[in-house]
Every structure is written in C-alpha cells, then in structure tokens.
Amino acid sequence: MREQPGFVSIPRLEERGHMGIKCGLDNIRALLEGLGHPETAYPVVLLAGTNGKGSTGAFLAHMLRAAGRRVGWTTSPHLVDVTERIWVDGSPIDAEALERLLGEAFEAEERAGIRATYFELMIAAALAAFRKRGVELALLEVGMGGRWDATNATDPVVTVLTTIGLDHQQYLGDTLEAIAGEKLCTARAGRPLVLGPSLDPAWIAPLLPVQPILCPAPRLGPAELHWDSSRVEGREVGLAGRHQVENLATAFEAIRQLRGLGFPVPEECLWQGVSETQWPGRLWRVPSLEQVWMDGAHNPDGARVLADHALACGVRPHLFFGAMGDKDLVGVARELQRMRPLSVTMLQGDSPRYATGQALFRAWGTEAPLLTLREATQRLRAPSDAPRLVTGSLYLLGDLLRGMGLRAF
C-alpha cells in the first residue's frame, strides 16, 4: 500500500528487517519488473572493483556533467545521509523524492511477494529516479563482488573494473582469482571491459565467464603529488594521491569507449570536470575542521596506497583509527604503520559491528589511547599544529560527521 504523507519509507528500510546480503538477482529483477523496467530507459556503465570504483565514478560523473550531459550515479555506502547514494545532474536526490521512490519500490515488493534487501530497494529506487529525471547515462557502482550484486541485473554498455584485492572474503572467496571471477561476471560478451592500469589483461582473460572487449587503461603522464592536491600533465586534479591518477586514467578510458559507442564527450570539457571532482571520504580535507583529513580505507590495499601517499609527500599525521570487526585489521594496521604517524588514537563506535578496543590493540601490536566517537569529535574540533588523519572505515567517517552535525555534501 502506498505510504501516507509523513514520509516514513526510509526508516522502513531498517525497521522491516531489510538489512543484510542476499545472493541472487531474483529480487531485484522482480522489483524492476514491478516498476516497469526503468533500467532500459538509458545506457548503463557498471563500475566494479575492490577499491577505486567510487573515485572513478566521481571522475566520470564530473567529466560528463562538465560536458553538458545529464548523468545519474549510484554509490555506496553513504557517509551522512542516505540521499548521497543517488545523484542526478551533480547533486544528491532530495529526501522527499527518495521517499516517493522508495514507496513505489515497497509497493512493487509487496506485489511480487518478496523480501528485498536495503541495497536492492535503493538500487531499484535509483534506477527509477534516473528514468523520472531523464538522464542520458547511468553510472552504477557495484556494491560487493558483481555476480549477485543488484546492479548486475542491468545490461551495461561498458563495464569498468578498477582493482582486485582481498575484501569480503566470507562472500567472494579467499583468493584473488575467486574474487576476480565474481567481479568479472559484470562484463558482457562483445562489449568493452575497461581495466584499471594495475590489472594485467593476460591474468584477467582466463578468468572471464564471457568474452568482452578488453580495454586496458593506459597510465597517464608525470604527476605532481602533494598531500591534498595533485597535478597531472600540468592540469589540476580534484582528488589527491597517486592511486587517484590511476583512477583518472581508468575514467579517461571509459570516456574513450563511450565515444566509440556514439556518446560524444568534448575533449575540452574533460579536464574541467577533473579539476572540479570532489569525493568526500577519500583523502578529504573536512572544510569546517582545522587540519583534519578523512579517508575510508578499510582493507590492506586501500591502506597501502594511503600510506604510500603520505610517505611520498613526507607527511606524518596524527592518526585516528577505527574499523569494522569483520575486516583484516592486522593487514590494515601493518600498512598504516609504515607512514610512521606522530601518534595513534583508537576509536570505538557504538554499533556492535565496530572492532573492540582489544581487537584494535591486538591488530596494532600495542595499546594506544581509546576514545568513544563522542570523545573523538571533541578532539577533532580542537586546534592542531599537524595534520590529523581519520581512517579505517567509511561507516566510521559517517558516524563522526553526524556526531559533529556536519554534512558531506
């Protein structure tokens, strides 16, 4: 039944037990059928990968918008507000529109007699939003893996695979080959599969379930790297870090493939979009705080590129670390310790998903100050004479921002 005025659909996502993970595409296909297949109203680009897919999507969304294209973009998780997961034409959807879309998704769910997950309902709402708003292209970030991810119920004209690393092993497998196999199920036969510069096509090819057109992204020219800014080929890049240069190269290759499919994007607009790209939570300087940067690195590969960047720039920050208990805490700690932080402070969230202080101490091999998130917000608001870096989880960043009454966008 349609929701009555008052807007309660967003809370229902959790109140009705829609959290969790379900392997299979039956639910999302039933939702999309009930909504009249909104995913067929525009071309789709799927963005898969262990790390980098959100940043690559950010580059693509800003470049296409600078070229005058009306673009829809989904990303997850959100930092502060669920509306961040659905972007249209450069801005997150407003709460009232999302409430209406979720109400329609709930109706489709009830008609189909299914129990959809939070992620499935949000993807269905996003795809419906893109049709309503008349987007010319949709960028869909895969939530986890690829084979059974709700985004894989679409028929992408281009698939992007940024990186492959060990994460979500309980669902995707314990080897890089197993994880790659799950992610490569997002490719489509005879269509472009853009590979990030770190991926070897000779290693990827035997793992493919179909035969797409392999399109390795070439490495870009020399990069000038600073702690919170970069320049590539003399041009300003909105996201800092050498890893972002690789994500940018991947985005450029995706644009080249879209052009070949009859989707014109003027060259002169691309660098404008690159310079304007912002992506909170990815080595992001929090505007209203003094000397505070936030990065959502939550696995060893993400922590490695973050540490590499700090070392390359000669920056030793005060480190604030908290993480979810199901992550590779030892692997992440080992990488972050390489940056030789001036100090380390552990953070303990209220949710049972957070790693306990004892688990954090074991991972780091030492004890350190342990703060609640409320205590951490007070510390981060205080002045500092050196950079402070908060990392370990996007969920951690979101909880801290909410606790300080700050928005990401």
Image (cartoon, grey):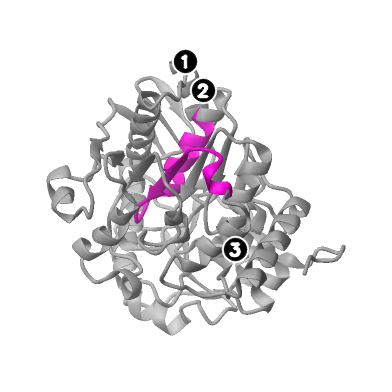
Would residue 78 be visible to someone looking at this image?
no
**Tag 3: amino acid:** Leu
**Residue at 47% across / 63% down in the picture?**
393
Residue placed under numbered mark 1 in the picture: 268
Label 2 and label 1: CA atoms lie apart by 8 Å
45 part of magenta stretch: yes
**Tag 2: amino acid:** Gln
Q: Looking at the picture, tell me which residue is in the foreground, 390 or 263.
A: 263
Q: Are marks 2 and 1 in contact (CB under 8 Å)?
A: yes
Residue placed under numbered mark 3 in the picture: 121
Q: Earlier in the sequence, mark 3 or mark 2?
A: 3
Badge nearest the viewer, 3 or 1: 3
Residue 353 position (above or below residue 3): below
Q: Earlier in the sequence, mark 3 or mark 1?
A: 3
Q: Looking at the picture, tell me which residue is in the foreground, 222 or 106.
A: 106
Residue placed under numbered mark 2 in the picture: 272
Q: For the magenta stretch, what is the residue range?
A: 38-63
Q: Looking at the picture, tell me which residue is in the foreground, 168 or 303.
A: 168
